[in-house]
Image: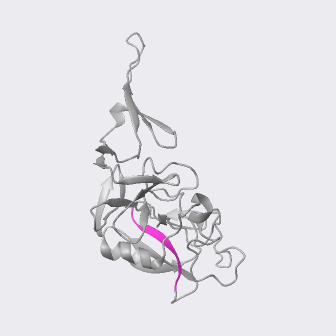
Amino acid sequence: MKRLAIILSLAFSLLALPSNAAKKELVMIITDTAGVEQVIPVEKIDSVLFAEDVCQAVEGHAVVDLGLSVKWAYANLDLDGENLESAPYVENGNALYGWADPTGRQHSTSLNDYPAGVNWPPNNVSGTEYDIVKANWGGEWRLPTDEEMKELMNLCTWTWETVNEAHGYRVTGPNGNSIFLPASGWRYGNDADAQGVSGNYWSGTLSTDNNNSGRSISFNSLIKGNGYSQRMYGFSVRPVRP
């Protein structure tokens, strides 16, 4: 069985205006699992991507089993409700969050505000009160640890792709299933940059080399790797769960 890759459970229809209408317009109506509809004129559709049915809906969100120690969310965390699970191929420069900010609203450039109210950052915030995923998705959803990020980097095949004008990596696990990590850039204070050029994703693990920084992965079309970045930077978040 195949489904459209842009959603888990899809209902769509092509509608034409009545023949006596002044202007006819053929549209595609896509309804996602949250009941949100997108109406797209057919003339604006460049392509429709199909994929094997490898996703599941767990605790309200789409998850993909890559054959690793944890399952990875189908799309990035987005607190503004732009419904990335219906359109994961999005370089969303707004969905960039500071390390250990569970609100996702902190744009301070002071390290003392990450996590807010804590003078010395914890070694790992994954699954804790400072975990932005846990705070907003609940259940067993959480930030990945640094070890889980390394597993994603080292055990998967990474292929740079451009899909629906979005740039990023197709990450294919040992079992052949894949997720797409868009290159959404980074944010410092209120200023975002490098959208479509670089991707930066937080883990919940503090750097052991420098406690001013959290562990992360970063990439562009030429290089990728695990590293660490100062905690006040806004990065993308890709949730995980057991």
Residue drawn at (49%, 53%) of the image: 61
Of residues 48 and 63, the one nearer the viewer is 63
Q: Is residue 121 above or below residue 32?
A: below
Which quadrant of the view contains residue 45?
top left
Left or right: 101 with respect to 161? right
Query: Front-most of 113 and 33?
Result: 33
- In the rendered structure, which segment of residues is drawn in magenta? 197-207
- Is residue 132 rendered to the left or right of residue 164? right
Residue at 38% of width from left, 29% of height from top?
13
Q: Is residue 100 magenta?
A: no
Seen in the picture, residue 210 relative to 71 is either above or below; the reply is: below
In this orientation, does residue 218 appear? yes
Residue occupying image coordinates x 63% and y 82%: 121
Q: Position of residue 113 (x, y in %)?
A: 68, 74
Tell me: residue 21, above or below residue 139: above
Q: Nearer the viewer, residue 52 or 179?
A: 52
Q: Main secondary structure of the magenta part?
A: strand
Give percent across and percent down for residue 112: 68, 79
- Quadrant in the picture for residue 62: bottom left
Q: Is residue 89 visible?
A: no
